[in-house]
Amino acid sequence: MRIRTLVLAAMTGAVGLAAAAQVPAQAQNDQFFPMLVYRTGPYAPSGIPVANGFRDYYTMINERDGGINGVKITFEECETEYNTKLGVECYEKLKNKGSTGATLINPFSTGITYQLIPKASVDQVPILSMGYGRTAAADGRYFPWVFNFPTTYWSQASAFVSYVGQQEGGMDKLKGKKIAHVFHNSAYGKEANPTLEALAAKYGFEFTGLAVDHPGQEQKATWLQVRRLKPDWIFMSGWGVMNQVAIKEAAAINYPMDHFVGNWWSGSEADVIPAGDGSKGYKSAAFHGAGTGWQVHKDILKYVYGGDEAKAKANNMGEVLYNRTVVNAMFGVEAVRTAQAKFGNKAMTGEQVRWGLENFDLTEARLKELGMEGFTRPVKVSCEDHETGGPIVIQQWDGKTWNVASDWISPIREVVRPMVVAAAEAYAKENNITAQSCN
């Protein structure tokens, strides 16, 4: 398995597709972030901008700020090909790197997240599965080492239903409507189904789930079902090549694109561009802005690419998934900073970072300081709530760019949170887990 080490403390000058320095992390006081990436395989179109976003933000923090309160960031990439078995192997190879071991782990795969949850408390490496993974982990009483803020698949699905209700003229107008869920036939893809089923019972719409097998290149049968069913709205939980194919197939049967809404992993440039004009009007959820209109991008351009806009664009800067991992990397860095406020300005252990994640309070004022005002929303985590139930926004593709197509939409918390608690309690009972005290 290919492992690429990028020690940002040693970097000078811009980083392009290849790092300026590629030597093992050996600093005495480095903050080590393992990176499980998939730059190869069927999901590479999604995995490449994800990896680049992490890399560039960590690099920028070192070059602009000298690290996190003087502690240099190091990281190491390990190629998973979005394969759960390889992902677990990568985790085992990386978890003890750096001066204090892994800071936290971003699995960037629901399947890998599921496998790492039992290991987190044993290894004392917190998991930050931002907007993916096991939704029940939002109950911090039973999952003290797992964090999935700012929002989860279940919250997202409920916000999607709220959006449909708004478009139809009220939640009461959902009765009798047909909503289909086209989903990747994996743990990830299935996550939204319980919420959609519960909301179908509550609001009276007809729900149909349509599974698409890995990797998603063959979908003719699925879209024949869609043509027969004639759903009023389609929600999609796809990834990688599956999204491209689904949008092309929807266009081929003349499905109205403005009623086709992907989840936040089904709304990137790589998903819509291959369909050409057929993708115009397609929508997706998000919890951050698109494009490069924020100070954080200006700082990345200056400190990582030396002002070379062409190189930055070639490395996906401003694309949806790149921006998402800039947010993700920021969450990790700010969790370390939160922990340092309690434990001192030195490299934090995984246990200390866990405390930082659980006491995470990202304010509007702090977002402004980070150059991210308006880019994403404030987040305040608690012992009981590792999700926070953050809102989503709907974006729409016009053939060239993503544009905001809604106000911020809150989840249907009164439905989702009890489901989270019930699922967490069931998991705890099955695995003999005792709740942590959250007094």
Image (tube, rainbow, N blue to C red):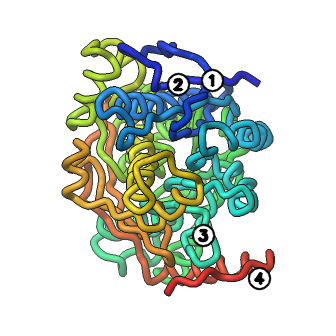
**Three-letter amino acid code at the position of disc 2:** Val
**Three-letter amino acid code at the position of disc 1:** Pro
Residue 138's label in the rendered image is none
Contact (Cβ within 8 Å) of mark 1 with mark 2: yes
Q: N-terminal of the two: label 3 or label 2?
A: 2
- The residue where tag 3 is placed is 144
**Three-letter amino acid code at the position of disc 3:** Pro
Above-or-below relation of 129 to 175? above
Q: N-terminal of the two: label 1 or label 2?
A: 2
Q: Nearer the viewer, residue 281 or 321?
A: 321
Above-or-below relation of 24 to 345? above
In the rendered view, does 61 fall on the left or right side of 7?
A: left
Report crowding for label 3: few under 14, some 14 to 19, many 20 or more residues within 10 A (C-alpha).
many
The residue positioned 60% from the left and 45% from the top of the image is: 100
Residue 7's label in the rendered image is 2
Report crowding for label 2: few under 14, some 14 to 19, many 20 or more residues within 10 A (C-alpha).
many
Q: N-terminal of the two: label 3 or label 4?
A: 3
Residue 15 spot, x, y in % from top left = 42, 16
- The residue where tag 4 is placed is 429
Q: Secondary structure at mark 4?
A: helix
- The image quadrant of residue 136 is bottom right
Q: Secondary structure at mark 1?
A: loop
